[in-house]
Amino acid sequence: MSSNPYVTDYQIGQDNVQRLGLDVHKPVFTISALLIVGFILFTLLMPESAESALGGAKAWSITHGDWLFMLSSNFFILFCLLLVLHPVSRLRLGGRDAKPEFSRMAWFAMLFAAGMGTGLMFWGVAEPVAYYTDWSGTPLNAPPRTPEGATAALSATVFHYGLHPWAMYAVIGLSLAFFAYNKGLPLTLRSVFYPLLGERVWGWSGHIIDIVAVLATLFGLATSLGLGAAQAASGLDHLFGIGDGLVSQIGVIVAVTLAAIYSVSRGLDGGVKRLSNLNMMLAALLVVFLFIVGPTMDIITGLGTTSVGYLEYLLPLSNWIDRPDEGWFHSWTIFYWAWWISWSPFVGMFIARISRGRSVREFVTAVLVVPTLVTIVWMTVFGGTALEEARAAGSELAQGIDTPSMAMFQMFDSLPLSSITSCVAIVLVLVFFVTSSDSGSLVIDSITAGGKQDAPTRQRIFWAAAGGLIACALLYGGGSTALSALQAGAISTGLPFTVVLLVMCFSLFRGLRWEKREYDRANAAT
């Protein structure tokens, strides 16, 4: 018998069935599909009841789980620092001879595009202005419409998109990549728990883990498509006067879904990679444009101010005890943490999918630092420009936030070439949606195919279409009420999944230490 605790007789895809040209893991695919259909029917037939029940679950999770969310998110950062400094950091995902599949720039672009690009587009202007103008409270009760309030607004926004969420993604992404590429286990969430559950992970314990991951991913994507379509529809209405109602929003979702289907049929290299590169190019153009025509000197000095402010507010905002801003704290920070954690299976698995060949240190450092630096630059340029306009009497942003989806376009209106920049921004929003849908369908397909990475293309197309159809059906049948219920359902999974992530840290570190001992033993023998 082998001394390797990770040796298993389980073969990837052995529980799969092949029907109608599909190759799927029967229990996970079937139960996930039935639960999805049941949930949709529930929200369509009884949208108010669904929103009430799921909204209550979300509120309870946020109110009573605030300490766990904050304690865990702080722990994830410390755990990532441990991995970077520990000797296990020299291990390579896929073994010592593994080579990266993508260049560093392509890798960085895909990291960011799949992670939270849509959130930065939607809230990059609206969130700091909301805090500055006291739209719904201020971080740490900072006085609104003051220099101190402006610093707190930008710092808190960076805090919500910086180290903490990316530490969550780093933990789950590294766990999935390590057990899949170094231990030969299926690229599904259940594999991470093999050191703890052993062969039981291939049974119902593992089925439940994977089913929850599928539901969280699909519902999160559908919610983002449905709610995010409002920004694109608002922008199109702002430019062309076509209206931002139900028809426009469904039209946006259909267009995004069709583009995602085309992209997913091209695979990672021909689809997501190219779209991610396009994303970063368009985003860079917008940043450069705002830097030139906006308050250039304020942006230059603001980079330092925002960075220092983020570090200054990092510890106070990370504290959950005796907060003076409890309402703001629950409505914003804890909501964000629950949302990011509910998204972590999707983002983490996608990061794992594109990270073979990276060392543990390179992986963790890149996933933590690169998106955080991009966020600081983005918020300084977009948020800083918006705050300058919010200080100016007579500007639309000076009146505060009315419709968050319109905030970015209101900022562009005060700048030269507003129509062109608004068009570029709309394209960027749409492409971010496409990459999210594309990468999400790849992730769901991997889980429902039992960890197979070479499943038929039609399965990926099926899941890309499913996300769009769910969003359209809920918008048409139940409107924003149904989508809010869906969002509440996704967020409610954040609290129990936080516990899963904590257990995952233990399992990952145990696996890495064993791998390092074997690595050292092999080196000593040569």
Image: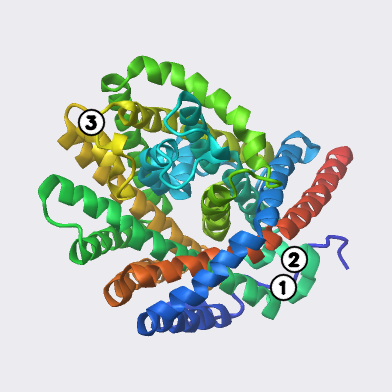
Closer to us: 67 or 435: 67
**Residue, x 57% and y 23% (percent of image)?**
308
Q: Residue furthest left?
A: 241
- Contact? badges 3 and 2 (CB < 8 Å): no
Horizontal and vertical percent for residue 48?
40, 78
Label 2: few (<14), some (14–19) or many (≥20) C-alpha neighbours in 10 Å? many
Q: Secondary structure at mark 2?
A: helix
* Mark 3: amino acid: Gly
Q: Three-letter amino acid code at disc 2?
A: Tyr
Around disc 1, counting alpha carbons within 10 Å, would you say few (fewer than 14), some (14 to 19), or many (20 or more)? many
In the rendered image, the vertical position of residue 130 relative to residue 471, given as above or below: above
Residue depicted at 68% across the width and 64% down the height = 191
Q: SS for tag 3?
A: loop
**Can the viewer see residue 452?**
no
Which label belongs to residue 201? 1
CB atoms of marks 1 and 2 within 8 Å: yes
The residue that disc 3 covers is: 394
Amino acid on which disc 1 is placed: Val
**Which residue is nearer to you in this view: 347 or 341?**
341
Nearer the observer: mark 3 or 1; the answer is 3
Per the model, the C-alpha gap separating discs 1 and 2 is 6 Å
Report the residue marked by disc 2: 194
- Which mark identifies residue 98? none
